[in-house]
Amino acid sequence: MNTITEPLDRLIEQLSAKASAPTAAADRGDAIDGILSGRPRQSGVPDLHQHPAVQQFRRDLIDGYIRVDTARQLLELLSLLVGTLAAR
């Protein structure tokens, strides 16, 4: 892990873990309760470390220059992820 990108990597790991964590099943006793209390589903969320916006941001950060469009792409990705996690 590069010390320059350590905070970014830590943030991405935390967000990835939250996004892929199974949600708690609500104990309401309805028809869906049996499905929800079963084996947790696997998330279809791709690995954020491999996302092109994250890779470009890491390269630019290591190289010492961050372009506005690179930062915007990463922020849009993180905004989408945070919005999705907040809706859970």
Image (cartoon, rainbow, N blue to C red):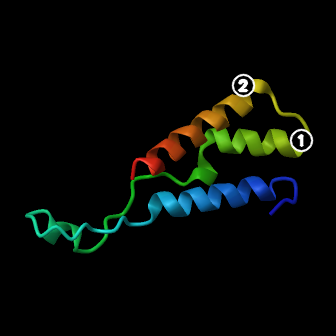
Mark 2 lies on residue: 69
SS of the residue under disc 1:
helix
Q: Is residue 13 left or right of residue 36?
A: right
| Residue identified by numbered label 1 | 63
The percent coordinates of residue 28 (x first, y second) are 16, 67
Q: Is disc 2 placed on a helix, strand or loop?
A: helix
Q: Residue furthest left?
A: 31
- The residue furthest front is 28
Quadrant housing residue 11 = bottom right
Which residue sits at x=38%, y=66%? 22
- As drawn, 45 above or below 57: below
Based on the displayed image, in which of its 4 quarters is residue 84 positioned? top left
* Category of crowding for the residue at label 2, using alpha-carbon neighbours closer than 10 angstroms: few (below 14), some (14–19), many (at least 20): few
In the picture provided, is 82 more to the left or to the right than 9?
left
Give the answer, above or below, for where 5 lies relative to 76. below
Give 80 or 69, whichever is nearer the viewer: 80
Between discs 1 and 2, the one toward the N terminus? 1
In-image side of 47 versus 63 (left or right): left
At which x and y percent is residue 69?
A: 72, 25
Tag 1: amino acid: Asp
Measured in 3D between alpha carbons, the distance from the residue under mark 1 to the one under mark 2, in whole angstroms, is 16 Å
Which one is nearer the viewer's eye here, 55 or 75? Answer: 75
Using the image, determine if residue 37 lies above or below residue 12.
Answer: below
Position of residue 7 measured from the top left corner of the image (x, y, whole percent): 78, 56
Q: Quadrant of the N terminus?
A: bottom right
Residue at 59% from the left image edge and 42% from the top image edge: 78
Q: Is residue 81 above or below residue 31?
A: above
